[in-house]
Amino acid sequence: MAELQEKVLKKLMEKGVEEAIVILRSDKKNCVRYANNEPTVAFSEAVDTLTIYSSIMGRSFLGSFENVSEDFIEKIVDEVVTMTKNSPPSPYYTQIPKGPFSYRSEKIVERRIGRLDEQLVSYVSEAVKASKEAGAERSAGIIYADYQEEKLVSSTGLSLREEASSIILNHRAFATPEATGQWVSCSTTLRDFDPYDAGRRAGEIAKMSLNPVPIDEGTYDVYMGPLIFANIMSEVASFSSGFLVQIEMSFLTGRLGEKVGSEELTIIDDPTMPQGLGEKVFDDEGIPTQRTVIIEKGFLKNYLHNSRTAKVAGVSSTGNAGIIYPHPWNIVVKPGNVKEEDMVQKLGKGLYLTNCWYTRYQNYRTGDFSTIVRDGAFYVEDGEVKRAVKGCRISDNLQRIISDVEALSNRLYPIKWWEVEVPTYAPAAIIRNVKITRAFG
Amino acid sequence: MALKSMDIVELLKKILDYAIASGASYAEARFHNDFEKSITLKNGEVEAVEASYERGVGIRVIVNGGLGFASTNLLKPETITHVIDRAVKTARASSSLKSVSIKFSDEEPYSVDWRVFEKKSLENWGLKDKVDFLKKLDSEILSQSVNVSSRYLTYSEEKTERVYVNTEGSLVLATVPRPSFFALITVSDSSKGVIQRTLQFGGSGGLEVVDSWRLEEKVKEEVKVLRKMLVDSVMPPEEIMDVVIGSEVTGIVSHEASGHPGEADRILGREGAQAGESYLKPTDIGRKIGSEVVNLVDDPTLPGSYGFYLFDDEGVKARRKYLIKDGRICEFLTNRETAASLGIKSNGSARASGYNVEPIVRMSNTFMLPGEYTLEELLNDVSKGVYIKSFMEWNIDDKRWNQRYVGLEAYMIEDGKITVPVRNPVIEITTEKLFSSIDAVGRDLDFTAATCGKGDPMQGVPVYTGGPSVRIRRIRIGRVE
């Protein structure tokens, strides 16, 4: 018996659509939010979404439909055909990929993660307990357990299926309202998921942050912990999207082949990483994903493309569709060789920052931006943490920051949370000459 | 709607029955049928015609004092009961860790069908008309003899249809159409570099709302301003000066420094790990936070506004809330859960961006109330200062105390007159210092559409930020080097 996505494809072709890609995604998600050491709400979600791309004579349309019942298929198909016919021709149109392609087949998915429910409450308890033991008074956070199945068919004969699952904890500990620490545990396996460790680390940072004092504005050398560096790196990698580059919403526009960062810095989009948080076999056009070096030793090597942005750029897709908006899947920053415990010593004098939040740009094209430092922030002198500080903001330029990366630690952490939407494997970093500002009054 | 309203109400009532039979002491169910269509123009050519249809049901239950939320768009009995079972199970497990049971404030149940009407139907405005409209705007942008190196324009329209029921007898049906427009414009100069501006417009209603934006004029004006700011601006002095901010800046200040910290869920710690908490404590009603001329409200009932609603997503009747009155904290934004914690009634601030997320405390249209002064009068009394009419970069810490706004269109004020353009003046200031330094409020009330993000899972909801021009005495102005 034909599956839903196959039926939709067949009907679209019968009604005169020339090309189509139909993707059926089934998401199952359970989550528990907590605050003040107690669960606040438990979520359970089951959602199917049908994504349809279609074209007729260079006119194209992209739709997302949530009413995926059999009796609604006719309506969906009629809507898609009408919208496609009425759409104007676009010079950005390109034929959908034909293949044949060869795909990786060894992806391992832990399906039981998608079935976790009450167990999530126990994980919350472990994280809260660990923070308390480390010196925090209270904790807040969220734990997600996701399972997703994706089926893609196309008019060019592709018929693909992929699963994914992950468990992600974002935990924030409060020693006082001003002394906070945050950590995450993110994994595609229960074996590597460690809520106690996340709670402990967040609690330790919170305790270290007690009695913070304001610091003077100025230029500081900064040791960025993995959370904040992952945030900055995910911004940089996301700016390599061919779409953002082409609308000049990126400081990487026009810089291909140029040195844009320090030679210490290599950033890769690697959806082929086994059991990576963002592991992906095929993209939304059915093209096999690939490991794409974005920045290598400071040089901008590649933008991330789908077929449409690749056509504009005169290159091939890098397997990063989004049919309209290409994006990274799984960002990996190549680690350095400094042990994490030696980073403060290596910094010598400056600031040790653990997290940031609320990044906004004055100018995407130049990379002028600021971001709020939050959770543990510390003044370092003579290779030692001297005191906790508060109220500071990085007010600088993204290009300048990545040019001044001096050293990276030798361990990568998988990071995904509210502020880091694309999974990012990041080390800690030492960055010279970062501009720090603070509020007046 | 895909289903008839009565069929949906029947379905939702069956869901309530099932939830109660499963052990819930309270249940509510909310059905959404939401669609959005959009057209994107990239550098003058159509990049995409897109549509999304979201339709499903969100169910909230209280079980043994624990809160559970289930959602699905698979409206088959076995799927609905499965997600409810899991939410009930996890809520029950959660309750074992709770020292205080979740309670909702007592509220009057309403049976009401409210809707926003389109005076000029958006549906009658065809796809070709919309494409032509965007292309005309694009050509206007290019007609100003300014080197516009890229343009990105999006027109969207959405319609949300909702049915809400709860076990206390509420039945609220709602229909709201909302058109919106977004643009990113980049202007370049070979020697001065590049400057960028994002623009957002939105409202509730039909094509008449789009007409009211006068976009052709606006984009032409913006392009000329961008060129002026790029080519003619000078660095502002870095010193303590008087500052006059325009409506757009007053709006973001109102939203960030008063609206967000006034959300009761933040005050009570419920957003601690993500959007953060607040500089306000539950006992801070009456606390002086600004000068006596500062009066600030959140009002979902403004006709035509982007954040318009008459009943919130818990079925509570919407009303204007005074966040700051005469410079003092007056009221927090609440939903039923936070209102019960504070021992008060909800003021109707619960919103959910879709069927698959819980309703949480949100702003709607947050703005400073206008005063008596014209812009000229505000400027007249400034011997040396900066007028900041618009901004690009901004952020604020997670207690909403330490904030930064970087001006885009900005000028020196000298002897009461606007003089040379200044480049990227920076206000970086604490909330109390900012509100306390305001000594005069203009009468030129205006609004800016925005999408406010909060919650985890993230929920973006349409809002207005707004206010008049405002004069701020003796604050520090910085620069972007």
Image (cartoon, coloured by chain):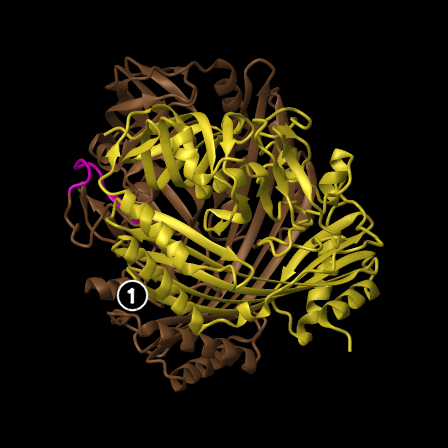
Chain colours: A yellow, B brown
Residue A304 in the figure: left or right of residue A39: right
Instruction: State the residue in front, A338 or B428.
Output: A338
**Residue at (37% x, 56% y) in the render:** A199
Characterize the local packing of mark 1: few (<14), some (14-19) or many (20 or more) Cα atoms within 10 angstroms: many
Locate the C terminus of chain A by quadrant: top left
Tell me the amino acid under the disc marked 1.
Glu
Q: Is residue A56 magenta?
A: no
Q: Name the chief secondary structure element in magenta.
A: loop
Instruction: Give left or right: position of B347 versus A49.
Output: left
Write down the region rendered in magenta.
Answer: B288-301
Give x and y (percent) for residue A185.
Answer: 46, 55
Residue B86 visible to an observer of this rendering: yes
As helix, strand or loop, the secondary structure at mark 1 comes to: helix
> Badge 1 is on which residue?
B337
Observer-nearest residue: A139 or B24?
Answer: A139
Relative to B314, is B184 on the left or the right?
Answer: right
In which quadrant of the rendered view does residue B333 lie? bottom left
Letter of the chain that mark 1 sits on in the rendering: B
